Amino acid sequence: MIHNPTGKERLALAFLLSMLGILGPFNIDMYLPGFPDIADDFNTRASLVQMSLTACLIGLAAGQVIVGPLSDSHGRRKPLLIGISLFAVSSLLCAISPNIAAFIAARFLQGLTASAGIVLSRAVVRDVFSGKELTKFFALLMVINATAPMIAPMTGGALLLIPFASWKSIFYFLSFLGLFITMVIYFRLKETLPPEKKGPKLDWEFR
C-alpha cells in the first residue's frame, strides 16, 4: 500500500490524520474552562469533576492497548469508523449526563474511543509512506498535534463566551466533530493495510 501520496491526496490525508490526532488533546483539554460550571450543575465537589479527567486519561491509555492489535487483525478503516463514531456518541452522553457518576463513565468511554484516532492516524502514515516521506509526514503531524493542547482550552473558552452556551456546548461540539470525522473516513479513506499484512485474529476477539 506504500505509495507516498502527493498533491491533493497528500493534503486530504494530512487534514484527516491531523483531525484524528487532535482528538486526544481536544478531549482532554477543551472542557477545562467549564470545570466550575460542571461542578455547579451537578452540585458536586471540584475533586469529582477532576476525576472525570482521570477517567478520560485511563480510557485513552486502555484504548491504545486494545485498538493497536485490533487494527493489525482487521485493518485500519473498520476500527476507525467504529471508534470515532462511538466517540461522537460518548461525547453526546457527556453532554446529557444526569449526574456526575454518569458523566465520569461517559468521559472514560470518550477517552477509550478517542484513542482510535491517536493510534490509527500513525498506523495509516506507516502504511502509505516510506523513507524520507514518512519522516517528513510524521514531522508535520507532530507539529499540528503539539499545538492542539494550546488551542483546545482556548476553543473551549471561546465556546463558553457564546450567548446561551454552557459547558455542554463543548461536548456537543466534540460530538459533531466526531460525526464529521466519521463521515470523512467513510467517504474518503480507503483501507491502507494490505490483506497479506493483516495478522491473525486474537484469541479474545468475538468471532
Image (spheres, grey):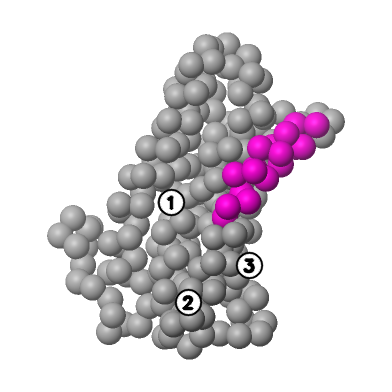
Does residue 5 appear to the left or right of 166 in the view shown?
left
Q: Quadrant of the C terminus?
A: bottom left
Q: Is residue 127 visible?
A: yes
Q: Position of residue 49 (x, y in %)?
A: 52, 22
* Residue located beneath label 1 in the image: 115
Look at label 2 and name its amino acid: Leu
| Residue at (66% x, 85% y) in the render | 7
| Residue at (41% x, 68% y) in the render | 123
Q: Relative to 119, say whether 104 is above or below.
A: above
The quarter of the displayed image where residue 167 is located: top right
Residue segment shown in magenta: 145-161
Q: Earlier in the sequence, mark 1 or mark 2?
A: 1
Magenta span: chief secondary structure? helix
Instruction: Check the image and name the residue furthest to the right.
Output: 163
Q: Relative to 5, say whether 71 is above or below.
A: above
Q: Relative to 162, say whether 98 is above or below.
A: above
Q: Is residue 19 visible?
A: no
